[in-house]
Amino acid sequence: MAATNGRPGHQRPAFTQVDLTLSVNGSSRRLRLDSRVTLLDALRDELGLTGTKKGCNQGACGACTVLADGKRVLSCLTLAAQCDGREVTTIEGLSRDDGLHPVQDAFIRHDGFQCGFCTPGQIMSAVALLAEGRAGSDAEISEFMSGNICRCGAYPNIVAAIREAAGRNAGI
Amino acid sequence: MQEFEYIRADDAASAVALVSGDPRAQYLAGGTTQVDLMLKDGVLEPERLVDITRLPLREITRDGDVLRVGALATMEELAADITVAQRLPFVREALLAGASTQLRNMATIGGNVLQRTRCRYFRDPAVAACNKRLPRSGCAAISGAARMHAILGANEHCIALHASDLCVPLVALDAVAHIQGPGAHRSVPLTEFYIVPGDRPDLENVLRHGELVTAIDIPLPPLGTRSGYLKVRDRASYEFALTSAAVALEISDGTIARARVALGGVGTIPWRAPEAEAVLRGARAGATVFRAAADAAIHDAFTVPGTAFKVELAKRTLVRILETVTGGSG
């Protein structure tokens, strides 16, 4: 961290902390964070919600996908400060009193993972994709899940899980 | 990573005042380029970030034959707009061909227009030679690994690419940027908004520091216009273009009355191709004229070994989308 920014006599900015209310999975927390903290790091390091994964940490892999006000976004490229007052949902917030979310169930039934590291992001993305109405065909699922990379190559089973969660039986 | 002060702007005027009054301040919208280049790559080092995402600049409204898109509308929101679906199908195709749904939910239209013209060497501060990052330091890409680079508007100073898909149909349609400055508003057509590198690759557009793009006006082409966007890339989805082409044709009795053509994946700026439009205008749709238009579109290409393939690929991309839009009657 370059407090002088490499320029002689240059002072660091005066206010580099930010106060915010982060509402995650239905509960709110007041936080004071360094302004550089991303939503991803706030979730994992401040709130202990380590289900959201840090893959590439530069917007290329989708492992950090969460919902912000119901829309899927990348938490690694979102500053925590920008989420002040917004409703964030992570993988920990999907399960219900009576068990797992149907998409989680479908991933287990179809073995939609191997190492599992990309899985929380895949599931959050799939939940959003179903809400967007983009599970009309296998091709559509593949296209609109393309922001979630699986290096194990579990794609066929991921598509099968989403197809089932969407209520369709056979691939189209 | 540089420390910075985060400020959330309440209205556009105070946001403009904050940034114009401080050379070390920058705007923050969707953050998909800004946060990436700043936090991750350490390329940008603002000391004050003015978050504009809660300003009331999000509306998409139709006024006659113009669609006014608030700069803070997201790519997904614009793609879902009914007028875009009905009247600007190739804009919708370009939007949905870009990035991923997650990024499109974050990225704004203003931010898409203002995304940095960039390349892997620009993104890597460990590479000393980058005229865009540090004027007169040289260009590592010229003799380096080039593929996702520009061949049009490029020169020995810089071959970084303007990678937007959306901006390709936007320049074809003569879209206009509305700009709020500390003193006055002004409007600039996107065809005059971007600057080819010359010997100053650090200058990418006509904006002065602190000026804020508030809206993009998209003129609607006449009813019956046929349009299409074709993107060619190394993988089927979630990848930048190697080449792309946007075309809008007004066809009457088999004759092209009006053609709008722009190319992506090849330019240091979103590349309008008036030479191709001139070839097509008044001609009957067909394979020979399509190839002639493509040959006219790509001229004075600046290639390096890694990008030489783009000359022919860009031509074939344009021919293919012209065939598709005219019903393959070629």
Image (spheres, coloured by chain):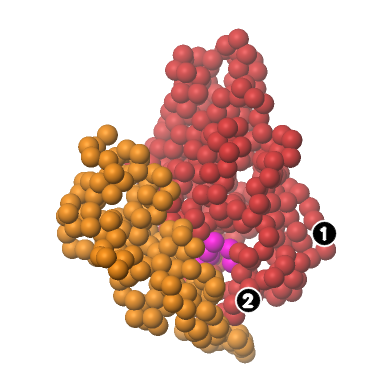
Prevailing secondary structure class for the magenta stretch in the rendered image: loop
Picture residue at 72% right of the left edge, 34% below the top: B65
* Left or right placement of residue A76 versus residue B57 in this view: left
The three-letter amino acid code for the residue at tag 1 is Ala
Picture residue at 56% right of the left edge, 25% below the top: B226
Query: What color is chain B drawn in?
Result: red
Across and down, in percent, residue B111 comes to 58, 56
Q: Is residue B264 visible?
A: no
Asked if B31 appears above or below B227 in the picture, the reply is below
Output the chain of dot 2: B
Q: Nearer the viewer, residue A41 or A172?
A: A172
Q: Nearer the viewer, residue B280 or B254?
A: B254
Q: Which residue is mark 1?
A: B184
In which quarter of the view is residue A58 placed? bottom left
Chain shaded orange: A
Q: Which residue is mark 2?
A: B7
Q: Nearer the viewer, residue B294 or A85?
A: A85
